[in-house]
Image: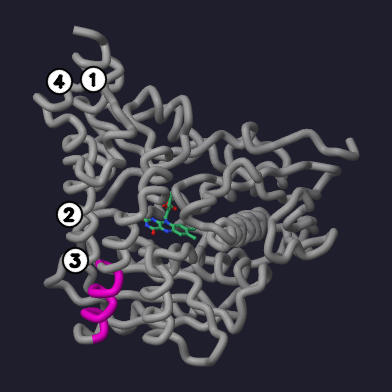
Amino acid sequence: MTGQTSRRRFLKIAGASGVIAAAAGGGYMLTRGPTRALRPWQEAGTAFHADPVRAALSYAILAPSPYNRQPWLVELPGPQEALLYCDLDRLLPHTDPFNRQTVIALGCFLELFSLAAAEAGFTTQIDLFPQGDPGNGLDSRPIARLGLTAQPDLPGDPLFAHCLNRRTTREIYDMGRDVPAAALDRLQTAALAAATVRFGATRNQAEAGQLRKLTREGVHREFASRAVRQETVDFMRIGRREIERNPDGIAVSNPIVELLQQLDMIDRENMAARKSRAFALGFERMEKLTLASPGFFWIATADNDRSSQIAAGRAYLRTALQATADGLAMQPLSQALREYPGMRKLYVQMHRLLMEQPGERIQMLARIGYAKPVPPAPRWPLEHRLRASASG
Ligand SMILES: Cc1cc2nc3c(=O)[nH]c(=O)nc-3n(C[C@H](O)[C@H](O)[C@H](O)COP(=O)(O)O)c2cc1C
């Protein structure tokens, strides 16, 4: 039996790809979870990051990003200063063709940076696009210049207290437990405090039902695109070893998957194939998640320029922290907001449903509810996301 044949046979016998898809949909188990890949969650703010810029950055790298790509890259040109760049090697060309979601993630990063700095008694001056707005195509110019100024009497933001517990929760949410109206009001207050955006939310079951239907359809269409599916599979980190080596992407870790990985029996092409069992199971799991969504919220901006995308990210990060404070689980469901041609029809329907003004863009849509807790997602250490300053 050749290596290839034996591999195929094993996959067939064990239904291995199905196991992987089920694990992917359900996050990872902690039986033998990663350790080094989670260290940034323990090291944030410790003495290890002695200067205030590094200390704030050690929190900012815990920001959410699509597919956990962590697209930030930082230079430290001088004391109390940082330049934030987008790492152009961390884009999602098929899923996010205009890099809109990547820029939202950079907005999340900026908000978390400034919350962490405020906690340490520093105000953050953020100059967006100091060498010009990149417009449609992102390029090598900086996204923002950050400057810290000491202000010892600065009151911290209470949201900061929740940043180490914030998670994206890909679990079934309790459909028997309503999201309180007051909690949605608090999300709105959190979102609007730092950014010019519009916040919308619903806990009404007729409205939520429409969103469940559209997001489910979005999942359906996403799975119909081979290129997008392959991008998803490419950024799955399968097994502890792979997660530790590349602590980004979507982590999949359980003992069976790990064994298959060690035996070199993971076949990524097979996983992305439409007729594969992995496809069917992954799809079913995602469908179940969209249907188990008691409430939704969304963040809209009046236009879709890069500054608006940054504002949406800042607002999103704050809502995520407020949700954490209220014991609520949340997960963005971005499928129907993505801009590749196969999603066009649904994108228009979603905007028709949620848009309040002509030209408005729905930047984020997330499900919200109550669910069992999940572990944190892997991160690259801060040092990995720093690069030598061009001027220094
Ligand atoms: C702009 C944006 C879009 C996202 N879209 C999705 C999505 O459609 N589905 C999903 O499960 N997570 C989505 N996420 C969440 C990321 O996958 C998540 O932040 C990342 O895996 C890291 O996990 P963490 O948030 O628990 O730290 C999105 C995050 C951002 C910032």
The crowding category of the residue bearing disc 1, from other C-alpha atoms within 10 Å (few below 14, some 14 to 19, many at least 20), is some
**As shown in the figure, which amino acid type bears the numbered disc 2?**
Glu
Looking at the rendered image, the disc whose residue lies closer to the viewer, 3 or 2, is 2
Residue located at (51% from left, 45% from top): 69
237 horizontally vs 43: left or right: left
| Image quadrant, ligand 1 | bottom left
Q: Provide residue 186's location: percent of width, then percent of height.
A: 42, 78
| Mark 4 or mark 1, earlier in chain | 4
**As shown in the figure, which amino acid type bears the numbered disc 1?**
Leu
Label 2 lies in ligand 1 vicinity (Cβ under 8 Å)? no
**As shown in the figure, which amino acid type bears the numbered disc 4?**
Arg
Rendering quarter of residue 58:
top right
| Mark 2 or mark 1, earlier in chain | 1
Q: Is residue 209 found inside the magenta-colored segment of the image? A: yes
* Residue on which the image places disc 1: 259
Looking at the rendered image, the disc whose residue lies closer to the viewer, 4 or 3, is 4
What range is drawn magenta here?
Answer: 207-216
Q: Provide residue 244's location: percent of width, then percent of height.
A: 43, 27
* Residue on which the image places disc 4: 9
The crowding category of the residue bearing disc 3, from other C-alpha atoms within 10 Å (few below 14, some 14 to 19, many at least 20), is some
* Residue on which the image places disc 3: 292
Q: CA distance from mark 2 to mark 1?
A: 24 Å
Looking at the rendered image, the disc whose residue lies closer to the viewer, 4 or 1, is 4
Q: Are marks 4 and 3 in contact (CB under 8 Å)?
A: no
| Mark 3 or mark 1, earlier in chain | 1
| Mark 4 or mark 3, earlier in chain | 4
Residue 284's disc number:
2
